[in-house]
Image: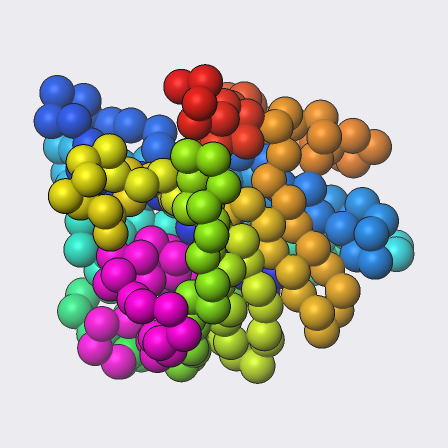
Amino acid sequence: MLYVLIGLSALFFSPVNAAQSSQIMFEGYYSIKADGAPIGYSIQRYEFDNKSKTFLNTTFMRLKMGEKVIQESLKAKANNKLQPISYQYTSQIDDQLKAIDASFSGQIMKLKISDGKKVREETHKIPKDTFLSSFLVYVMLQKKLPLNQAFKYSGVAEEEGASYWGKAWLKSKETKGKLTVFTVLNSFKGDEFKSQLAAVPHPDPNEKDKYVKGEVLSTEFPKNKITTELVASPNLATEGQVLPNKTLTMLFSGIPAGKVNLVATPVDKE
């Protein structure tokens, strides 16, 4: 569940240049701490394929909590209206394996779920306008919600292969330099958390309520005292942690540099 909450979203809100077939819109490393002590990291990449008009979210997370080691990965695909197309999720908790291969057609979600030994298939009907939960913040900002107006939604918890109702809202916003920083509150599957979202306003003064990109800077989970923070370089998240290079190379087609974000490359340096 943590990787979904940590990986809310970090996407451009403006369309990709038609001359580009594919664009990495965000790539960054998040440091994860419990009670202020490092317990792991998350790597995220968001892309848009202009040819197929699809968004792709690739996420990897590794945590060490006591003697328990948790690794999760996700490849999630949605169309340009954020309607789900498919996703592949894998997790390993010590020696326990789980994999979900999901595909969508309208309100029908088909799953193949494996524990490494057996595969079972399931079919579920999901509520209209359900989206993959890892795209939540992008969906929120596309709706241009006013402050403190709750947005009720149905999101797929990718790690479970099930949809749940949630509620999110923009609690506050403030200007910091060239950025607008929102505080986002969310309740999903019984978990409540708070995120700081940085957005770059549209340069045209006539488009003052639009943003050209936005990224989650940090997230706080009061229930279990876990925090995440977007950092400027990979070593700030992975120092002292295991980095499974082979797994990352297969997932991302190389080791992510983590430089396509507002922390590694501040907007005043772009």
Residue drawn at x 35%, y 33% as measured from the top left:
25
Between 135 and 210, the one lying in front of the other is: 210
Depth check: give the residue in front, 103 or 173. Answer: 173
Picture coordinates of residue 28, whole percent (x, y) = 53, 34
In the image, farthest residue toward the right: 66
Is residue 62 something that shows in the picture? no
Q: Position of residue 160 (x, y in %)?
A: 50, 70
Left or right: residue 195 versus residue 102 is right
Q: Is residue 166 above or below residue 251?
A: below
Magenta range: 127-154
The quarter of the picture where residue 23 lies is top left
Is 142 in the magenta?
yes
Q: Is residue 169 left or right of residue 191?
A: left
Residue 139 magenta-drawn? yes
Please give the name of the residue rendered at 72% of the width and 30% of the height, measured from the top-left corner. Answer: 236
Note whether 11 is above or below 141 in the view shown. above
Q: Is residue 85 above or below residue 194?
A: above
- The residue at 47%/68% (across/down) is 171
Q: How many marks?
A: 0
The quadrant of the rendering that contains the C terminus is: top left
Q: List x then y, in percent, for residue 91.
A: 60, 54
The residue shown at (42%, 66%) is 170
Tell me if I can see residue 219 in this picture: yes
The answer to which quarter of the image holds residue 229 is top right
Colour pattern: rainbow
Say left or right for 187 vs 103.
Answer: right
Q: Quadrant of the N terminus?
A: bottom right
| Residue 62 % position (x, y) | 68, 45
Is 128 located above or below residue 33 in the figure? below
Nearer the observer, 11 or 85 = 11
